[in-house]
Amino acid sequence: MRKIGIITALLCLAAAAAFLLWPRAQDPPEQKELTVTDSTGRTVTLPSHPERVVILNPSNLDLYVAAGGAENIVGKPTSQTLSETVKEKTAAAEEVGIIHQPDIEKILALQPDLVIGTNVPFHTGLEETLSNAGIPLYIQALDDVPALLGTLEFYGRLTGNEETARTQAALIQEKLDAVKKQAEGRTPPKNLLIFGAPDSFNMGTSKCFTGGLIDMLGGGNIADRAEGDGAYLPISMEFVAREDPAVIFVIVHGPAETLEPKMRRDLQENEAWAGVDAVKNGRVYVLPYDLFAVNPGVRAADALQALADIMYPAPQ
């Protein structure tokens, strides 16, 4: 009987050891690939945690760095809008050209396992070449704040830093909400958002990112009452004169400190614009290049604050 007891005990120990060492069904191997839908509606299969990433535009670069992925970025756009933080953290990455002219030879030479761009022909047009090289292309547009925050969290998933990305997204939202409170209960000035110059470029509606920020501060953008659909519409001087905006925002590619005085002077000397309220009262503002020439990324609240300071100036 004692022998049987000892044998039984040994069998129980062996069974326990086998249970502990046996691979558990609830711990499957880590997923190596993700299949997602990008901003163009394409289905893209990409590495679950890419190790060599090339990013073609500053806004997506900004968010990927904020999500803790700087060490995996091997290629970045040539741009003057990068924050000092992004410049420092991506110092080792190779420049692969400006947003409208990516250098495909440099990109291929870097042997990335993922290329991220935005929804412009200069990026979507790279799909076939990259596909032939076995490199996935993920297109991420950043047309509004929800897209920005959602993208930040998605990049947190790719970098394996989900908690960092969620914390960053919550902090951005908190800052945006604080700025929005400044506009609560106030009547927004009638305003116009111009991209480029008044004689040759477009006006932005609430469907573009900056137009959406204006909407968050109460609106008043006259372009939202113009004929047409989309984020950008041609400027009609007849329409602008009729609406008579009290504030004009201008986004141009270049330093605001030199362009703002020139823009005001050009408008004042232009008969068609000279009678517009914003021009007569000197309320034409060239917005900061680093915050408005491209999507501001994690600095979205800074961009919102810049607009709020113009729309609702402190009483003197």
Image: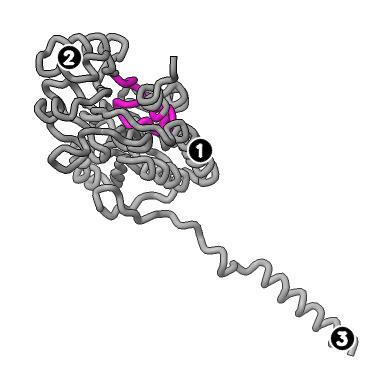
Residue type beneath disc 3? Lys
Label 1, label 3: how far apart the Cα atoms are: 71 Å
What secondary structure is marked by label 1? helix
Most prominent secondary structure in the magenta stretch?
Answer: helix
Q: Residue 213 at x, y = what percent?
A: 35, 35
Quadrant holding the C terminus: top left
Q: Quadrant of residue 58?
A: top left
- Say which residue appears at 24% left-offset and 21% top-offset: 252
Residue matched to label 2: 267
Q: Earlier in the sequence, mark 1 or mark 3?
A: 3
Q: Which residue is mark 3?
A: 3
Q: Is residue 279 above or below residue 212?
A: above
Residue 235 position in % (x across, y down): 13, 29
Is label 3 in a helix, a strand or a loop?
A: helix
Examine the rendering and report whether any part of residue 218 can be seen: yes
Query: Which amino acid type is shown beneath numbered disc 2?
Result: Leu
Q: In this view of the protein, which residue sits in the foreground, 257 or 17?
A: 257
Q: Which residue is mark 1?
A: 174
Quick check: 257 above or below 229?
above
Residue 44 lies within the magenta run: no
Q: Provide the residue span drawn in magenta.
A: 286-304
Whole-angstrom CA distance, mark 2 to mark 1, is 38 Å
- Residue 194 located left or right of residue 289: left
